[in-house]
């Protein structure tokens, strides 16, 4: 997981700089061609020797259904971290794409260095409410009032803090509430 988060820390800063130099058209073209370069490697991989278990079902009990409602809404907010936040900061706040890339780098670095530490102390499922309040009630509400890059750095800190609380707890709680046959 650390490698993925390290890539998330470095990639957006590099991508933001490349965007400033080349623009989205070239980057999207490269983004579509680069995965195709992996096809020859994928063709050489052997087929796995397993049979998928038939009859997988999705059973939802009352507690799980009640948990899914706020989780769905929270994950909608979490989705704002991608393109919508980049577009908002770029078009409405006036940050360069490179500056937004640096914000995503901040997010990745915080996750790399703090997620394990925070994860060790997240033992109580009730903390998910705190994470949801930090996400919606503080972090993304504050984004609407951020005047520049320095405040955006502070805002990204709180968005990332909420992410490190909500995401692992949501997955753990969902796993605990789900019917064992549906896991």
Image: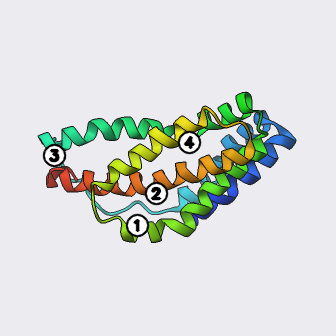
Q: Is residue 63 visible?
A: yes
Q: Residue 82 location, x and y as percent?
A: 58, 40
Marks 4 and 1 in Cβ contact (< 8 Å) = no
Find residue 9 and report its image quarter.
bottom right
Q: Nearer the viewer, residue 113 or 38?
A: 113
Marks 1 and 2 in Cβ contact (< 8 Å) = yes
Left or right, 138 with reference to 173: right
Which residue in the protein does label 1 denote?
119
Marks 4 and 3 in Cβ contact (< 8 Å) = no
Q: Residue at x 69, y 35 (%)?
A: 89
Are there few (<14), some (14-19), or many (20+) residues within 10 Å of tag 4?
A: some
The way the protein has been coloured in the rendering is: rainbow
Are there few (<14), some (14-19), or many (20+) residues within 10 Å of tag 1?
A: few
The answer for how far apart the CA atoms under marks 4 and 1 are is 21 Å
Marks 1 and 3 in Cβ contact (< 8 Å) = no
Ranked by sequence position, the earlier of labels 4 and 3 is 3
Which residue in the protein does label 2 denote?
164
Ranked by sequence position, the earlier of labels 1 and 2 is 1
Left or right, 179 with reference to 86: left
Which residue in the protein does label 3 denote?
55
The answer for how far apart the CA atoms under marks 4 and 3 are is 36 Å
The answer for how far apart the CA atoms under marks 1 and 2 are is 8 Å
């Amino acid at each position: 997981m650390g490698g993925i988060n390290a890539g998330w820390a470095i990639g957006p800063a590099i991508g933001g700089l490349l965007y400033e130099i080349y623009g989205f058209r070239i980057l999207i073209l490269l983004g579509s061609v680069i995965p195709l370069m992996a096809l020859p490697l994928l063709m050489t991989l052997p087929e796995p020797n397993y049979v998928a278990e038939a009859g997988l079902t999705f059973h939802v009990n009352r507690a799980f259904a009640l948990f899914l409602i706020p989780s769905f809404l929270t994950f909608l907010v979490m989705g704002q971290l991608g393109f919508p936040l980049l577009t908002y900061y770029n078009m409405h706040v006036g940050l360069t794409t490179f500056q937004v890339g640096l914000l995503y780098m901040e997010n990745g670095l915080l996750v790399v260095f703090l997620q394990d530490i925070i994860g060790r102390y997240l033992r109580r499922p009730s903390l998910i409410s705190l994470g949801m309040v930090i996400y919606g009630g503080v972090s993304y509400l504050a984004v609407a009032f951020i005047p520049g890059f320095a405040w955006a750095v502070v805002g990204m800190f709180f968005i990332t803090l909420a992410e490190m609380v909500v995401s692992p707890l949501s997955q753990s709680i969902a796993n605990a509430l789900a019917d064992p046959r549906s896991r």
